[in-house]
Image (spheres, helix red, strand yellow):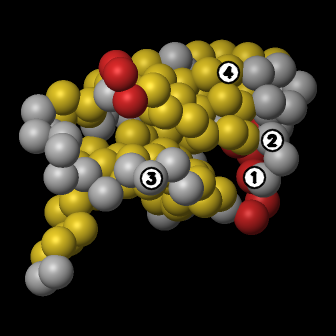
Amino acid sequence: VQLQASGGGLVQAGGSLRLSCVASGNIFSISRMGWYRQAPGKQRDLVAFITSGGTTNYADSLKGRFTISRNNASDTIYLQMNSLKPEDTAVYYCNALRLRVSSRDDFWGLGTQVTVSS
């Protein structure tokens, strides 16, 4: 599975950005796709994910500001980020998860930088 993320950039506080991630390869076995982020000096944290069935899940602190969605026809997921804050500054990583009875495989794209200025 290969993941190509795009859409990061520099935005002022209160602004919006939309990230995209296109999946290719053996995607039929993917259970869910999502976004993680990592700020300098911090661990990589879950932002949101969406399952193959369309169920979504968000980090509690981001509910109401971020929305994850998917376009099955183009094997793309999106992350709409509104009311951005300086603390949202991080590298955002696209993730695909393959879950099987006895194994778990995580696939990662190259990150895309999001910088929110105050």
Of pointers 4 and 2, the one earlier in the residue sequence = 4
Residues tagged 4 and 2 counted as in contact (Cβ below 8 A)? no
Q: Nearer the viewer, mark 2 or mark 3?
A: 3
Q: Which residue is mark 2?
A: 65
Residue at the image position 10 percent from the left and 40 percent from the top: 26
- Which of the marked residues, 2 or 3, is nearer the chain's N terminus? 3
| Relative height, residue 69 to residue 14 (above, below) | below
93 vs 51: above or below: above
Amino acid on which disc 2 is placed: Arg
Q: CA distance from mark 3 to mark 1?
A: 22 Å
Which is more N-terminal, label 1 or label 3? 3
For this view, does 58 lie left or right of residue 73? right
Task: From the image, tell me which residue sits under label 1.
Answer: 62
How many neighbours does mark 4 have within 10 angstroms: few (below 14), some (14-19), or many (20 or more)?
A: some
- Measure how far apart labels 4 and 1 are at the Cα level: 14 Å
Instruction: Give the distance between the C-alpha atoms of the residues marked 2 and 3, in whole angstroms.
Output: 22 Å
Between tags 3 and 1, which lies in front? 3
Q: Residue 7 placed where, x, y %? A: 52, 17
Corner quadrant of residue 60: bottom right
Of the pair 88 and 76, the residue shown nearer to us? 76
Q: Which residue is depicted at the point 60% across and 40% down? A: 68
Amino acid bearing label 4: Leu
Residue 40 visible in the picture: no
Q: Are marks 1 and 2 in contact (CB under 8 Å)?
A: yes
Q: CA distance from mark 3 to mark 4?
A: 25 Å
Give SS at disc 4.
strand
Counting every numbered tag in the picture gives 4
Q: CA distance from mark 4 to mark 2?
A: 11 Å
Residue 33 appears in the picture as rendered = yes
Q: Amino acid at mark 3?
A: Gly
Q: Residues within 10 Å of mark 3 (few under 14, many from 20)?
A: few
Label 3 sits on residue: 53
